[in-house]
Image: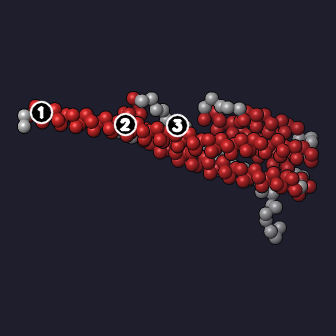
């Protein structure tokens, strides 16, 4: 066999291998990006569920602590800001953190009213909100795991070449603020026994 033909065959095989690798890597980025978006949609569903619970919670607390107007207005403002579509995930996270802090202050107000803590409607809303917060935390973990996988692939050589050539950008984490990085505890002792 002619050395030129051998060289052309080797070069042709290498070119085909590089093209197949490029296509496979690009498809992997698309798959990971779609997983990140799917995970975000799950978080978004739970966030909207929380937005729907908050007005009922505020109205219930208002019935017992109507003079705490500033707290109610703060929760309402924070809910409105969080419910609006944000330009970036970082902005959405900041809005959600402000809402979580406002809800924490609302529960702090409720702590001062034993009759409110005993109210069945308040207890049901409290349980529903706690359940929703747990779902948000789980969704956030799933979303952040997908973001980590996507970003790792995007930053790992040689896949980073394909990522930069095709316009993929780092995804942003959806993180909770605060030193404990947990949602505020909303248990007023209803589930405790012996106290």
Asked whether the residues under the numbered discs 2 and 1 touch, taking CB atoms below 8 Å apart as contact, a structural biologist would say: no
Asked whether the residues under the numbered discs 1 and 3 touch, taking CB atoms below 8 Å apart as contact, a structural biologist would say: no
Horizontal and vertical percent for residue 34? 52, 40
Q: Which mark is residue 171?
A: 3
From the image, state whether disc 3 or disc 2 is nearer to you: 2
Classify 10 as above or below 61: above
Q: Residues within 10 Å of mark 2 (few under 14, many from 20)?
A: few
Q: Which mark is residue 23?
A: 2
Horizontal and vertical percent for residue 85? 67, 32
Determine the CA span between mark 1 and mark 3. 46 Å
Q: Closest to the observer: 55 or 193?
A: 55
Q: Residues within 10 Å of mark 1 (few under 14, many from 20)?
A: few
From the image, state whether disc 1 or disc 3 is nearer to you: 1
- For disc 1, the marked residue is 5
Quadrant of the snapshot with the C terminus: bottom right
Q: Quadrant of residue 54?
A: top right
Left or right: 111, with 29 as reference point: right
Taking the image as drawn, is residue 135 in sight?
yes
Taking the image as drawn, is residue 155 in sight?
no
Determine the CA span between mark 3 and mark 2. 21 Å
Q: Which mark is residue 61?
A: none
């Amino acid at each position: 066999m002619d050395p030129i033909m051998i060289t052309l065959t080797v070069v042709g095989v290498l070119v085909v291998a590089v093209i197949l690798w490029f296509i496979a890597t690009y498809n992997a980025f698309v798959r990971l990006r779609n997983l990140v978006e799917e995970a975000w949609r799950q978080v978004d569903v739970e966030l909207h569920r929380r937005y729907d619970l908050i007005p009922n919670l505020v109205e219930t607390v208002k019935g017992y602590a109507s003079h705490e107007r500033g707290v109610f207005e703060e929760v309402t403002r924070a809910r409105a800001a969080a419910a609006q579509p944000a330009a970036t995930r970082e902005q959405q996270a900041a809005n959600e953190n402000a809402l979580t802090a406002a809800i924490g202050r609302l529960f702090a107000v409720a702590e001062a009213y034993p009759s409110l803590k005993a109210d069945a409607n308040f207890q049901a809303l409290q349980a529903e909100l706690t359940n929703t917060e747990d779902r948000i935390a789980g969704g956030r973990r799933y979303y952040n795991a997908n973001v980590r996988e996507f970003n790792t692939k995007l930053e790992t050589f040689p896949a980073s070449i394909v990522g930069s050539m095709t316009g993929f950008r780092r995804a942003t984490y959806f993180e909770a603020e605060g030193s404990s990085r947990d949602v505020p505890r909303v248990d007023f002792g209803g589930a405790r026994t012996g106290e």
